[in-house]
Amino acid sequence: MKNRSIVVAESFFLSLCLALCLAPAQAAPATARGTPQNPWKIGMSQCNLGEPWRVQMNKDVKDAAAQHPELDVIFIDAQNDSRRQQTDVETLLARGIDLLIISPKEAAPLTAPVAAAYKKGIPVIVLDRKVLGEEYTCFIGADNIKIGRAAGDWIVKATGGKCTIVELKGLMTSTPGQERHKGFMEAIQGHPDVKVVFDADCKWLEPEARKEMESALSRFPAIDVVYAHNDPAAHGAYLAAKAEGKGREKVIKFVGIDALPHEGVAYVKDGVMNATFQYPTGGAEAIDMALKILKGQKVPKNVTLGTRYFDDANIQSGGQAIE
């Protein structure tokens, strides 16, 4: 017969084992947000990918985010539709994003969705095109009025203050289009012999610009300069002039904005355009700012990006900064 103390010890041991087996499993501690295992989710709402400059913006965002495994960026393309972009913002919020980056198609239609996200406590970085009011965390973009003014100054100087101009505008319900026009008009208003004889809203699209330039060429035998709000529009105007078959593409000065290395800058090098003014995408800066916000750091309300211009005189030296 077993010793009583041994029986008690065995009973206790069996009870302890049973209790441990029946005890509920303890959940593993949650991984902190903002780690490679549990990255912060950033929603990137792009207004369209029909413009090379916007493709570059998405690439710049993607490349910058790839350096940070604690970030996961979800990209959505609104396909140049403001209503669709409104829905895109709602979709991103429903997916539990921690921060929204948006480049709005138009200011007014996207103001309310941006404000709604901001009021819900989701930080919002507005990139390139503005919304109305200030219900967002940070705006990043270059000074479009300054760029438009610089383009106007360049045209006045290049033509000796006497020329006829075709202005091919960007989407005029967007703030960059409005501001590039405003700055340009400020630059030429003191020069009565600098005249805009034709203008059209080309919605940032090269095919639209080419069509409008064909109309201008048919109406005006003397055109000295094309001022286009982006490089695709300037390129479309050049193609229209070349297709006309009168050699006017060789005498008209083509001036655009964007200055992507493979687009506007390349056009100036090739002699297709005479000048292009840089409009940085802000993609890398947006990721940098997003990290600061997600880490609880304070950021400025507005970040103004620098710019430079490229023409025949400075293209080989990398352009010249606009002060």
Image: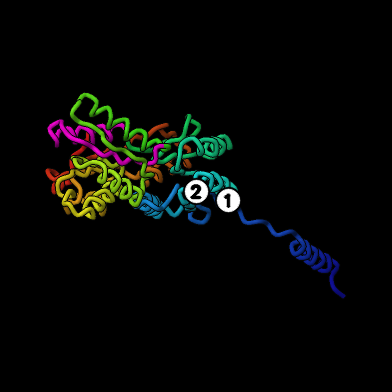
- For the C terminus, the image quarter is top left
Question: Does the rendering let one see residue 67?
Answer: no
Q: Which residue is mark 2?
A: 43
9 vs 112, left or right, is right
76 vs 314, left or right, is right
Q: Is residue 17 magenta?
A: no
| Nearest the eye: 279 or 118 | 279
Q: Which residue is mark 1?
A: 95
91 vs 136, left or right, is right
Residue found farthest to the top: 190
Q: Position of residue 120 (x, y in %)?
A: 58, 37
Q: Position of residue 253 (x, y in %)?
A: 18, 43
- For the N terminus, the image quarter is bottom right
- Label 2, residues with CA under 10 Å away: few <14, some 14-19, many ≥20: many
Q: Is residue 171 magenta?
A: yes
Q: Which residues are magenta?
A: 145-172
Q: Residue at x 31, y 32 (%)?
A: 145
Position above or below: 208 against 181? below
Q: Position of residue 92 (x, y in %)?
A: 55, 48
Q: Residue at x 12, y 32 (%)?
A: 160
Provide the secondary structure element on which disc 1 rests.
loop
Residue found farthest to the right: 1
Kind of residue at disc 1: Arg
| Nearest the eye: 274 or 88 | 274
The answer to which of marks 2 and 1 sits earlier in the sequence is: 2
Kind of residue at disc 2: Gly
Disc 2 and disc 1 in contact, CB within 8 angstroms = yes
Position above or below: 17 against 162? below
Provide the secondary structure element on which disc 2 rests.
strand
Q: Label 2 vs label 1: CA separation?
A: 9 Å
